[in-house]
Amino acid sequence: MTSTTTNTETTTSGATGGPADARTGRAGEPAPPLRLAVPNKGALSDATVEMLREAGYRVRRDSKELVVTDAENDVEFFYLRPRDIAVYVGSGTVDAGVTGRDLLLDSGSPAVEVMTLGFGGSTFRYAGQPGRVATVADIDGKRVATSYPGLVRADLARAGVAADVVRLDGAVETAITLGVADVIADVVETGATLRSQGLEVFGEPILRSEAVLIRGDRPEATAAVEVLQRRLTGVITARTYVMLDYDCPRELVDRATELTPGLESPTVSPLQDDRWVAVRAMVPRAGRNRLMDELYDLGARAILVTDIAACRL
Ligand SMILES: Nc1ncnc2c1ncn2[C@@H]1O[C@H](COP(=O)(O)OP(=O)(O)OP(=O)(O)O)[C@@H](O)[C@H]1O
Ligand SMILES: O=P(O)(O)OC[C@H]1O[C@H](OP(=O)(O)OP(=O)(O)O)[C@H](O)[C@@H]1O
Ligand SMILES: [Mg+2]
C-alpha cells in the first residue's frame, strides 16, 4: 500500500511503450502531425480542453476518447494521465503537452516549460498537526508522506534535512491520521482538504505551480509548437483583455488615450461631427468598469466594451 523510498525512483509510467516511437523526420518529406498530450482527467483536464477548443482545435466528445486526430490543424491529441505527460514529452514520444509545473519538476523529465496557461494554480507545501512541527528543520528524522517524492527529496536536500519520504498515490492528508507519516507535503489550493484533517501548513511554499505547456527537443516539431503557442497566447489575451470603444471631444483625446494606451497604440478615427473623435483600444478586462467611469468623468460618451473572441498579437 505504501512504500518508503530514500533514493531517486524510476518512473513506472508507460512512456517507452507510448503512443508511438520518437520520429526522425526526413528532409523533403511533409512534417508529421504535431503530437500533443492533454490531461485526460483531474484538476487540469477540463480547463485544458476548453482552452484548446477556444484555440480552434478539435477536442474529444466524450471522456472515453483517448486519441483525437485533428486533420485540419495537423495535430494528434493524446489524452494521458497528467502525471505521465512530462515523461512522454521528455522521452520524445509526444512533442508537447499540458501539465502542472509541480508534476514536470517532480518527474525529473528533460521536457522544458514553454509558457504558463493561466489556470491550475496551486502551491506545494508541508503540513502537519498544529504544535508538532513548525519549521522544515523539525522534519529531520521524521517521515514525510507525499505523491511528489522528487520535489520533496530535492527540497529536503536543499534544506540539509534527512527524512524518510513515504510515497503515496493520493489522499495524502490522511497519512498522519493513519500513522504512516509525521508530516505531509502536498498540493494546496484552497486549503479545505488540510483543514478537514486538522492539519496546518508550515515553512515556506516548496513551489508555486500552475498549468504549463511543455515541449521536448525534436527540432522538426519546433514550428508547429510555435503555432500552438501563438494560438494559446491568443486565447489568454482574448480572456485577459476587452475591446473598448468610446467617443471623445477632440480636445480631450490626449488625456483620454493616456488612460487607454492600448497594446501598441489606440485607434483614433474622425467622426462626422469634427468636434468629436472615436477611440478604440484593448484594455485589461479587470478594472474595465473603473476605467469606463474615469472616461465618462473626463467627458467621453458612448463607452462600449466588447469581448474579444480570438486574437493573434
Ligand atoms: N485543487 C487542486 N487539486 C489538485 N490538483 C490541483 C488543484 N489545483 C491545481 N492542481 C494541479 O493539478 C495537477 C494535479 O492534477 P491531478 O490531481 O489531476 O493529478 P493526480 O493527483 O496525479 O491525479 P489523481 O488526483 O487523479 O490521482 C497538479 O499540477 C496540481 O498542482
Ligand atoms: O487545497 P484544496 O483546495 O483542498 O486542494 C488540494 C487537494 O486537492 C488535491 O487532491 P485530489 O482531488 O487531486 O485528490 P488526490 O489527493 O487523490 O490526488 C490535492 O492532492 C489536495 O488533496
Ligand atoms: Mg490529485
Image (spheres, grey):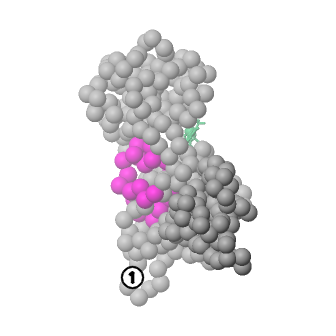
Where's residue 155, x and y in %?
Answer: 34, 34
Residue bounds of the magenta highlight:
91-115
* Residue 268 in view, yes or no: yes
Where's residue 301, x and y in %?
Answer: 71, 61
Tell me: residue 66, above or below residue 33: above
The answer to whether residue 304 is left or right of residue 190 is right
Question: Which residue: 72% across, 76% down?
Answer: 273
Where's residue 250, x and y in %?
Answer: 62, 69
Q: Could you tell me which secondary element the residue under label 1 belongs to?
A: loop
Q: Residues within 10 Å of mark 1 (few under 14, many from 20)?
A: few
Tell me: residue 310, above or below residue 188: below
Q: Looking at this view, is 253 or 5 the one in front?
A: 253
Q: Looking at this view, is 310 or 292 the one in front?
A: 292
Q: Looking at this view, is 63 or 263 the one in front?
A: 263
Q: Ligand 3 falls in which quarter?
A: top right
- Magenta stretch: includes residue 90: no
Give the amino acid at mark 1: Arg
- Magenta stretch: includes residue 113: yes
Q: Looking at this view, is 163 or 192 the one in front?
A: 192
Question: Which residue: 31% across, 21% down?
Answer: 137
Where's residue 206, x and y in %?
Answer: 40, 34
